[in-house]
Amino acid sequence: MTRHIIDIDSTIADNSYRASLLSKHCNICFSPVSSFHRSACPNCSSTDVTVDQSAWDNFLSPELVSADLPIPEAQRVIKYFVDNNIDHIYLTGRNESLRFVTEKWLMLHYGYNPARSRLLMRPFPGKEESASACKEKLFKSIYDRTESYVFYEDDPHVFSLYQEYGLVLRCPEAWQYLYPRGIARHNEPIRNV
């Protein structure tokens, strides 16, 4: 059996508005760094940046999280998963304090049903742990070596972790290739993964 492991932020949720609120600075030369997702320092090109805790708190406010927009291509693929009972699990670095708002958002935009699909989240507290370390622990809690895995992820730091266990698809870019608009119009199945 193939299990599909799906990240949320920047993978199926367009959180670009929230990301624009993150104030960052370079840990090498201490210059301000663009709030754009994964930007490098304009002075020294370092990607070793820090985000202020108050900025993270704003980024993760339930009001802003609930206002994220779904990524339409992801909606088509996940609707196909739901309609065809294809096993998929949401695995996110969001912490448990956001479970209610995350489940409600997933139900509204992706047909999430807790009885049919799982949502794995960062235990609370747990802010000090990197997203990749958190996701590794969460994944290992469900890992079964007799199954195969496809991962849908936007974070390059997590790609190498997942590559050890299965196929990694870089999102949100991969969604359009899995279920192109023309196929959706003609009700043909997505390409097998």
Image: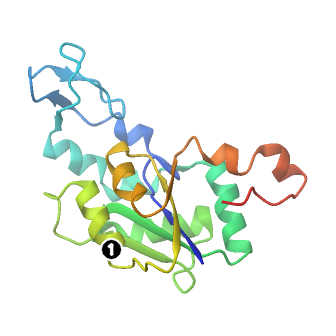
Q: Quadrant of the C terminus?
A: bottom right
Dot 1: within a 10 Å radius of its alpha carbon, few (fewer than 14), some, or many (20 or more) residues?
A: few
Q: Amino acid at mark 1?
A: Lys
Q: Nearer the viewer, residue 99 or 117?
A: 117
Residue 59: give x, y in percent of width and height: 30, 47
- Residue 55 vs 178, above or below: the answer is above
102 relative to 191, above or below: below
Residue furthest toward the right?
A: 186
Q: Identify the residue shown where x is 48% and y is 61%.
A: 166
Give left or right: position of 66 versus 185: left
Q: Quadrant of the N terminus?
A: bottom right
Secondary structure type for disc 1: helix
**Residue 87 as seen in the image, left or right of residue 136:** right
Residue 167 versus residue 18 in the image, above or below: below
The residue shown at (49%, 80%) is 146
Choose top left, top right, bottom left or bottom right for residue 66. bottom left
Display colour scheme: rainbow
Residue for point 47% across, 77% down: 118
Question: Percent position (x, y) of residue 70?
Answer: 57, 51
Name the residue furthest bottom. 115
- The x, y position of residue 79, in whole percent, is 69, 65
Q: How many numbered discs sit on the rendered protein?
A: 1
Residue at 18 percent of width and 33 percent of height: 49
Q: Which residue is mark 1?
A: 140
Horizontal and vertical percent position of residue 90: 47, 67
Position of 180 compared to 116: left or right? right
